[in-house]
Amino acid sequence: MRMGKQQAWAENPQKRQANVVWQIAYVDSRKIYKQKINITPAQVLSIMEEHNIATDSVVRLIPRDPCVSLSIENYCLTSQKNRMDVSSVWRKLGCKQTYDQFFSPAARRPIYASSCVQTPENGSREQISKANSQIDCV
């Protein structure tokens, strides 16, 4: 017999958390970034499990590069407050350089996982792509 969502989520709360994170990311992608979303709730769950995100933590998913759709190659898992700040800056200014400043280690913003940042086991937390910083503000 097939179990319902409520029962499945009760057995695996992180699955529910991943679904909520995905739903908010979907709305943000469509309304704020004007992009499609190319990531599934199952992929969000695997990212959260891979990075050991606690089920009681409030995390949000945003695109690392706002000009490209949110996907497994272009994501950043961050705090709710940081998501609100980053999204507000993109909505009001549309400036990629200002957007990228939120991901700088000097900004000291909470970033739990990112597709464009090397993890400590791969080396330093420097950005892999320098092409992002070459786009000027409008």
Image: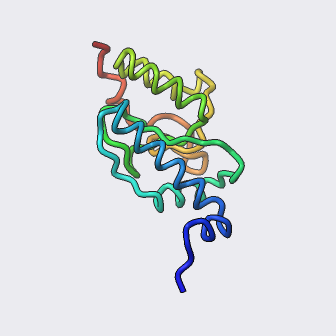
Quadrant where the N terminus is found in the figure: bottom right
Q: Is residue 18 above or below residue 61?
A: below
The structure residue drawn at horizontal position 55% and vertical position 54%, both measured from the top left corner, is 18
Q: Quadrant of residue 116?
A: top left
Residue 125: which quarter of the image?
top right
What residue do we see at 58% from left, 21% from top? 107
Task: Return the residue nearer the eye: 126 or 64.
Answer: 64
- Image coordinates of residue 71 in percent, x first then y, are 37, 49
- In this view of the protein, which residue sits in the foreground, 1 or 70? 1
Horizontal and vertical percent position of residue 75: 44, 43
Describe residue 106's horizontal placement relative to residue 33 as left or right.
Answer: right
Q: Residue at horizontal 53%, vertical 60%?
A: 46
x%, y% of residue 129?
A: 38, 35
For the image shown, how many numbered marks are present on the structure?
Answer: 0
- Give the vertical position of 123 relative to 82 (above or below): below
**Colour style of the rendered protein structure:** rainbow
* Residue pictured at 45% horizontal, 43% vertical: 25
Q: Quadrant of the C terminus?
A: top left
> Residue 89, percent across and down?
44, 19
Seen in the picture, residue 34 relative to 112 is either above or below; the reply is above
